[in-house]
Image: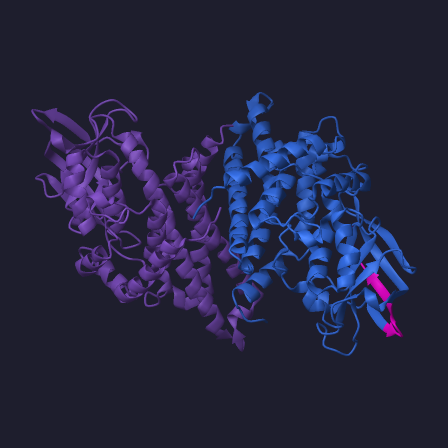
């Protein structure tokens, strides 16, 4: 039992931190808020050269064959640096389901491209019902000759507008978890339209409409009607990734705030010498560290296939969603007026925390799952 | 990043469990919170008998080096040991101060004679120690203590008063901090003594807590004369000896698992009980509350494991152990509170009421934890320590 990072993980973390401090400064984060694409192709290629897109892809498919715990270490750094763009959508929402359920052909075609940074992907799962559960999937896929025709609307699709391909969750029949079919769809297929949503984090989520979109049967991922299991697995990884992002984000918000409290002078002394401020930061450090280690537990449990992995993931997301919200709220309050300005950086963390708190199920959603799993 | 124990460690855990099954006292089943108020925490017989049984296994201070009567357990083995004792609510109070405070301090600062005199008697459960630190006017501001020890020839003469002294009415020995230099700045004039409780001039007087227990005492010193050999370490260095984190003091890590047992009992209660025809679990908020408790219990354990990780890697934890303690104290309090509130009106019943649920354990937990949020450094003082020592924030 050892909850710390091993040597390889530590190297990865240190390298990523140095790299992102240099390559993804605050100026880039702000620029990408206004940018149409929302990511820097130049940075994307540099990250690909580090092998990050292929971090959890096996060496057979051009990746480096590391594991989920390493991905968590890396995404924590992404949260710290607020790296904009489709990294998690590509690696987790695209790569994970293909690794999990793809045919040999699909894997050979797509995974090396992901690893090389030549393919941007996402998953189109949620719809206007805004549900994470299978009964929220209504987008219709109707058999037509040798292929299928897709009609419907997806909402909150991360980085959809810049993707080359999307994994689209559709309903080919049945109800609930039965009858959901996944398709790997070219994003530029006729009949697909993207409209970028304006969100508080200024990330790029899209409304994606499908109007008589024709896709071949060969583009099915897994088996017809059996897609939900693949989505569930992807959701597990995505939820852990969301936690990891929140851990890094909280840590950085906390670090910035702690420094500010030590430097800002009022009443002739640093405000950090007041107990009212000290106790907030003592609470915050529990929230930051607690988030980190409960996330590690979730990642490890999933990686090792532990029986209670789902419970650990829901515990981690419930706790981390609440805890990170408390951390950034303290961050705003301790910064006072300057924290409320657009110019100062702390607000960048505040807005993004809420985004990731909501993604893949907020605290209430996961608390309910924890309650269900207590088997009372 | 590895949350798994080795097969040897799992085996050790099983060995402790099996041993506890045979050796936990029948009376009260070793469960502190199931007892009635007249068979209370401070019952020395149960504690002493259990300490003797532990001693026969070498388990009073199993993490101490073998030369001092321990088994030299690894950090992780110690963690497992503490977890199993906490899960079983084993009555380990007899040796708590000796193992947690007196012994480690003697190991670091004691002379060979002091080590020889005291350490094996702690591990053999021959001596019970109490802690003479707090005073009526020196609580959170412990360094403001006024009890004096004045040099007189080869002796020291002690006058003053201590308070909140757990177990002083049974203890044979006391670790005592007293002022030896009246003129020095307050942290620099304090010395550390090992005091035989039979010394003439010591009076103890009970201080009954709000649970009705006699655990605390006031202790009065009236011209208590002790030899020079009673001084531990250097004169006037006592404050630093009392407050330095002793890197092998890890007897408290793992105690959070006591929360696990309470959670399991509460889960069973919620699953099996209906009030007026409605299962408790269907009442608004109950399951959400239980989920929060479960998350907190899990995280409390993880935060303790994190401290053990640092220790096992040979690092000295700083704020990490403070946050684990703080989190776990709050967690255990919230568990007690959750249990009581879920029981509604029944939550207020004392353990010996015929209507009581779960032996009144949750209301006792709730009250007991109210005390623990204060004892051994209040929540607020802990937060000051985290902020100032851990985060390097400036003092006011």
Q: Chain A is which colour?
A: purple
Q: Is residue A339 left or right of residue B262?
A: left
Q: Is residue B152 magenta?
A: yes
| Coordinates of residue B359 in the picture (x, y in percent) | 70, 31
User: Residue A104 appears in which quarter of the rendering?
Assistant: top left
Q: Nearer the viewer, residue B80 or B267?
A: B80
Q: Quadrant of the C terminus of chain B?
A: bottom right
Highlighted range, magenta: B151-166
B39 relative to B94, above or below:
above
**Left or right position of A374 against A67:** right
Chain B drawn in what color?
blue
Is residue B358 in the magenta section? no
Query: Which of the 4 image quarters holds residue A297?
Result: top left
Tell me if I can see residue A348 in this picture: yes
- Secondary structure mostly seen in the magenta stretch: strand
Q: Nearer the viewer, residue B75 or B211?
A: B75
């Amino acid at each position: 039992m050892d909850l710390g990072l091993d040597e390889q993980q530590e190297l990865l973390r240190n390298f990523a931190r140095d790299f992102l401090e240099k390559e993804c400064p605050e100026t880039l984060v702000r620029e990408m808020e206004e940018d149409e694409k929302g990511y820097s192709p130049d940075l994307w290629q540099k990250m690909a050269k580090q092998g990050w897109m292929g971090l959890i892809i096996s060496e057979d498919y051009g990746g480096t064959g590391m594991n989920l715990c390493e991905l968590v270490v890396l995404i924590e750094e992404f949260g710290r640096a607020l790296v904009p763009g489709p990294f998690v959508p590509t690696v987790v929402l695209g790569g994970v389901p293909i690794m999990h359920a793809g045919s040999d052909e699909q894997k050979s075609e797509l995974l090396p491209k992901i690893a090389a940074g030549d393919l941007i992907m996402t998953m189109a799962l949620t719809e206007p019902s805004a549900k994470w559960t299978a009964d929220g999937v209504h987008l219709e896929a109707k058999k037509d000759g040798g292929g299928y025709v897709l009609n419907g609307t997806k909402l909150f699709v991360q980085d959809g507008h810049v993707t080359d391909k999307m994994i689209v969750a559709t309903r080919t029949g049945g109800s609930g978890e039965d009858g959901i079919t996944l398709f790997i769809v070219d994003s530029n297929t006729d009949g697909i339209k993207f409209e970028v949503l304006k969100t508080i984090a200024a990330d790029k989520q899209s409304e994606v409409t499908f109007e008589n979109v024709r896709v071949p049967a060969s583009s099915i991922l897994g088996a017809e009607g059996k897609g939900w299991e693949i989505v569930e697995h992807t959701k597990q990884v995505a939820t852990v990734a969301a936690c990891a992002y929140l851990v890094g984000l909280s840590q950085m918000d906390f670090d910035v705030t702690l420094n500010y409290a030590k430097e800002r002078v009022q009443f002739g002394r640093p405000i950090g010498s007041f107990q009212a401020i000290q106790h907030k930061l003592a609470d915050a450090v529990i929230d930051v560290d607690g988030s980190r280690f409960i996330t590690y537990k979730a990642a490890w449990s999933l990686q090792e296939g532990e029986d209670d992995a789902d419970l650990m993931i829901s515990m981690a997301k419930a706790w981390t969603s609440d805890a990170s919200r408390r951390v950034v709220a303290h961050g705003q309050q301790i910064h006072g007026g300057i924290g409320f300005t657009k110019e100062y950086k702390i607000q960048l963390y505040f807005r993004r925390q809420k985004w990731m708190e909501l993604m893949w199920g907020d605290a209430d959603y996961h608390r309910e799952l924890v309650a269900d799993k207590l088997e009372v | 990043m590895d949350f798994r124990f080795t097969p040897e460690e799992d085996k050790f855990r099983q060995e402790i469990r099996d041993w506890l099954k045979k050796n936990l006292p029948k009376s009260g089943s070793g469960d502190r919170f199931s007892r009635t108020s007249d068979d209370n925490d401070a019952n020395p017989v149960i504690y002493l008998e259990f300490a003797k049984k532990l001693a026969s296994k070498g388990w009073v201070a199993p993490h101490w080096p073998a030369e001092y009567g321990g088994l030299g357990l690894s950090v992780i083995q110690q963690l497992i040991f503490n977890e199993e004792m906490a899960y079983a609510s084993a009555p380990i109070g007899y040796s708590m101060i000796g193992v947690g405070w007196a012994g480690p301090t003697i190991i670091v600062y004691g002379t060979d004679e002091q080590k020889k005199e005291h350490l094996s008697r702690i591990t053999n459960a021959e001596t019970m120690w109490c802690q003479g630190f707090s005073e009526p006017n020196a609580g959170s501001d412990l360094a403001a203590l006024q009890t004096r020890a004045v040099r007189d020839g080869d002796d020291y003469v002690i006058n003053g008063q201590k308070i909140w002294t757990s177990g002083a009415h049974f203890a044979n020995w006391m670790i005592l901090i007293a002022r030896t230099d009246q003129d020095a700045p307050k942290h620099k004039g304090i010395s550390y003594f090992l005091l035989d409780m039979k010394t003439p001039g010591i009076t103890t007087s009970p201080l009954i807590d709000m649970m009705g227990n006699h655990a605390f005492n006031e202790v009065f010193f009236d011209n208590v004369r002790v030899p020079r050999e009673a001084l531990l370490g250097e004169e006037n260095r006592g404050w630093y000896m009392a407050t330095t984190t002793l890197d092998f003091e890890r007897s408290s890590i793992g105690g959070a698992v006591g929360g696990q047992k309470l959670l399991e009992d509460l889960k069973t209660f919620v699953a099996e009980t209906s009030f007026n025809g409605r299962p408790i679990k269907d009442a608004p908020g109950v399951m959400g509350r239980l989920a929060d408790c479960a998350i907190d219990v899990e995280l409390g354990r993880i935060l303790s494991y994190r401290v053990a990780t640092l220790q096992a890697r040979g690092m000295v934890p700083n704020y990490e152990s403070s946050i684990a303690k703080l989190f776990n104290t709050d967690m255990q309090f919230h568990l007690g509170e959750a249990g009581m509130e879920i029981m509604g009106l029944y939550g207020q019943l004392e353990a010996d009421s015929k209507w009581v649920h779960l032996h009144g354990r949750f209301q006792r937990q709730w009250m007991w934890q109210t005390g623990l949020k204060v004892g051994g450094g209040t929540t607020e003082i802990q937060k000051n320590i985290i902020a100032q020592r851990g985060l390097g924030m400036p003092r006011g």
